[in-house]
Amino acid sequence: MARGFNRVILMGNLARDPEIRYTAGKQAVANFTVAVGRSWKDKNGELQESTDFIPVVVWGAAAENCERYLKKGRPVLVEGRMQVRNYEAKDGSGKRYVTEVVASDVTFLGSRRQEDSPAPFPQDDGFGDSVRKDHRFGGDEEFPMDISEVQGEEDADIPF
């Protein structure tokens, strides 16, 4: 059998707050929807815009962290795989199919100042690879850097 490749990377905003539940084995699972905008020019050259609403599933401790730190409107980067599952409808009317992204990594984007929720960002990288604040830029530094935070031009070490 040929080996396939199933990798999804989404960047967008949460369309609703994450909803968390627990399996019978006490495993946390969170569901949320990422709104991803796109634009194109139609045949008349007019700019058209559309938004895709993509369901995401996150498991384990990552699910609990998403529920704690993510809120509607928050920018997020999701990496994972596409999954299509089916189930029998409760009313007996046949099979139902669900297409969703199963997240392996969720990165919280945006700055703390933009956060409307009372829950702060996590301060350390104690989330492993499942869910983390983007610390690639070091410490509490946020990226992209807000130039208004620089204390005078002569003190700024801007690399451009």
Image: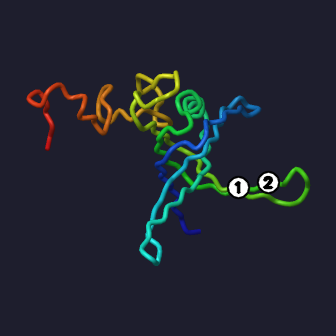
| Closer-to-camera residue (119/23) | 119
Instruction: Assess whether mark 2 and mark 1 are in contact (beta carbons under 8 angstroms).
Output: yes
Judging from the image, what secondary structure is the residue with disc 2 in? strand
Amino acid type shown at disc 2:
Tyr
Residue shown at 78% from the left, 58% from the top:
96
Marks 1 and 2, how far apart in space? 8 Å
Q: Residue furthest left?
A: 154
Residue shown at 15% from the left, 37% from the top:
158
Q: Mark number for residue 28? A: none
Q: Quadrant of residue 153?
A: top left
Residue 87 x, y percent position in the rendering = 79, 54
Q: Quadrant of residue 18?
A: top right
Residue shown at 47% from the left, 52% from the top:
9
Q: Residue furthest bottom?
A: 43
Eye-nearest disc, 1 or 2:
1
52 vs 115: above or below: below
Q: Mark number for residue 98? A: 1
Q: Left or right: where does residue 77 sit relative to residue 151?
A: right
Residue shown at 70% from the left, 55% from the top:
98
Residue 43 x, y percent position in the rendering = 46, 78
141 vs 13: above or below: above
150 vs 79: above or below: above
Q: How many residues crowd around disc 2 within 10 Å: few (fewer than 14), some, or many (20 or more)?
A: few
The residue that disc 2 covers is 87
Earlier sequence position, callout 1 versus callout 2: 2
Judging from the image, what secondary structure is the residue with disc 1 in? strand
Amino acid type shown at disc 1:
Val
Q: How many residues crowd around disc 1 within 10 Å: few (fewer than 14), some, or many (20 or more)?
A: few
Residue 67 x, y percent position in the rendering = 59, 31
Q: Quadrant of the N terminus?
A: bottom right
